[in-house]
C-alpha cells in the first residue's frame, strides 16, 4: 500500500490519546475508535506510522496490532482473555523439565528456577514442577493467586501479556515481565532454552535462527508495549 499521509501526530481526545494522520484519527481493525490509555503508548504507535516509507509495511505495525487486540478483543470479553492467559499456567513450560540425569536438566534449572521461585515468593504460593511431559495440575491456590495478579491490569497490559505468554508458552514468564527492571532478552532466553540447547548440540538452521530473532524482537516489543501502557 502506498503511503497516504504526510503528518503523524498524537492528540488527547475521547478520554485518552489518539494517533492522527494528517489530522484524522485512526480506527482499529474492527472500526472502533483507537483510543490509547497513556501518552507513552500513543507515542509508540505513532512511531510505527512515522517510520513508514513510500510503501507501508503492514507487518511492521506490531504495537498497533496489540492496541487493536486490546480494544477489539480484550475489552468486549475480559473473561475470555483471562481464561486464555490462565491456560498457560496449567501447562507452563518452566514447570515441565527433563529428568535430572539428562544433560539439559541443569540448563533448565539455571534459567527457569529463579523465575519460578521468584513467582512463588511474590505470590506466596507453591508451584508444581514436573520431570517429563505427563501433566500434573497446579494447586488451586497458585492458580487463584496468578489470576488475582491479572485481574487488575487494564486491557492494553493484558493484550501485551497474551503476546508474551504465547511467545514463551509460560504465564510465569509473562508475569515476570511485569516486575520493575524486567529484562526482555533474559526472559526470552529462558523461554527459548530448549530450542537453544538443541541448536548448541546440532547447529542453527538459517530459517530457525531467523525465526528466533523475530520472536525475540516481538517479545521485546510486547514488553515495551506493557510498560508504556502502565506508565
Image (cartoon, helix red, strand yellow):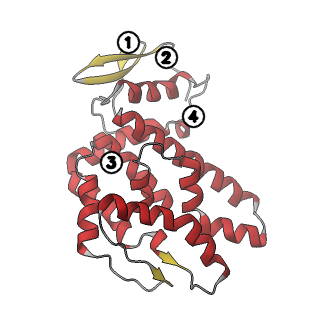
Asked whether disc 1 touches disc 3, contact meaning CB atoms under 8 Å apart, the reply is no
Tell me the CA gap for discs 2 and 1.
10 Å
Tell me the CA gap for discs 2 and 4.
14 Å
Res. 57 mark: 4
Tell me the CA gap for discs 1 and 3.
29 Å
The residue where tag 2 is placed is 5
Quadrant where the N terminus sits is top right
The residue where tag 1 is placed is 23
The residue where tag 3 is placed is 158
124 relative to 100 in the view: left or right: left
- Displayed quadrant of residue 101: bottom right
For the residue labelled by badge 1, is the local secondary structure a helix, a strand or a loop?
loop
Does label 4 or label 1 sit earlier along the sequence? 1
For the residue labelled by badge 4, is the local secondary structure a helix, a strand or a loop?
loop
- Displayed quadrant of residue 15: top left
Give x and y (percent) for residue 116. 44, 66
Give x and y (percent) for residue 36. 32, 30
Asked whether disc 3 touches disc 2, contact meaning CB atoms under 8 Å apart, the reply is no
Residue 98 drawn above or below residue 66? below
Nearer the observer, disc 3 or disc 2?
3
Does label 2 or label 1 sit earlier along the sequence? 2
Residue 149 drawn above or below residue 62? below
Q: Residues within 10 Å of mark 3 (few under 14, many from 20)?
A: many
Asked whether disc 2 touches disc 4, contact meaning CB atoms under 8 Å apart, the reply is no
Does label 3 or label 2 sit earlier along the sequence? 2
User: Which residue: 43% across, 38% down?
Assistant: 225
The front one of 88 and 207 is 88
**Number of marks in the rendered image:** 4
User: Which residue: 39% across, 53% down?
Assistant: 162
Q: Residue furthest right?
A: 203
User: Which residue: 54% across, 40% down?
Assistant: 59
113 relative to 86 in the view: left or right: right
Amino acid at each position: 500500500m502506498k503511503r497516504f499521509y504526510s503528518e503523524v501526530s498524537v492528540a488527547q481526545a475521547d478520554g485518552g490519546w489518539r494517533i492522527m494522520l494528517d489530522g484524522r484519527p485512526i480506527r482499529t481493525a474492527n472500526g472502533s475508535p483507537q483510543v490509547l490509555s497513556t501518552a507513552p503508548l500513543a507515542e509508540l504507535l505513532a512511531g510505527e506510522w512515522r517510520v513508514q516509507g513510500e510503501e507501508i509495511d503492514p507487518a511492521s505495525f506490531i504495537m498497533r496490532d496489540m492496541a487493536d487486540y486490546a480494544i477489539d478483543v480484550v475489552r468486549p470479553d475480559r473473561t475470555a482473555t483471562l481464561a486464555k492467559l490462565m491456560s498457560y499456567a496449567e501447562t507452563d513450560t518452566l514447570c515441565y523439565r527433563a529428568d535430572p540425569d539428562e544433560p539439559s536438566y541443569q540448563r533448565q534449572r539455571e534459567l527457569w528456577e529463579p523465575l519460578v521461585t521468584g513467582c512463588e515468593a511474590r505470590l506466596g504460593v507453591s508451584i508444581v514442577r514436573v520431570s517429563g511431559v505427563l501433566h500434573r495440575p497446579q494447586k488451586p491456590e497458585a492458580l487463584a493467586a496468578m489470576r488475582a495478579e491479572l485481574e487488575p491490569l487494564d486491557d492494553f497490559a493484558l493484550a501485551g501479556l497474551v503476546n508474551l505468554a504465547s511467545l514463551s508458552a509460560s504465564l510465569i514468564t509473562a508475569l515476570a515481565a511485569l516486575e520493575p527492571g524486567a529484562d526482555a532478552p533474559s526472559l526470552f532466553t529462558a523461554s527459548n532454552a530448549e530450542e537453544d540447547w538443541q541448536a548448541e548440540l546440532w547447529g542453527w538452521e538459517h530459517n530457525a535462527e531467523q525465526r528466533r530473532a523475530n520472536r525475540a524482537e516481538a517479545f521485546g516489543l510486547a514488553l515495551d508495549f506493557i510498560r508504556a501502557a502502565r506508565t
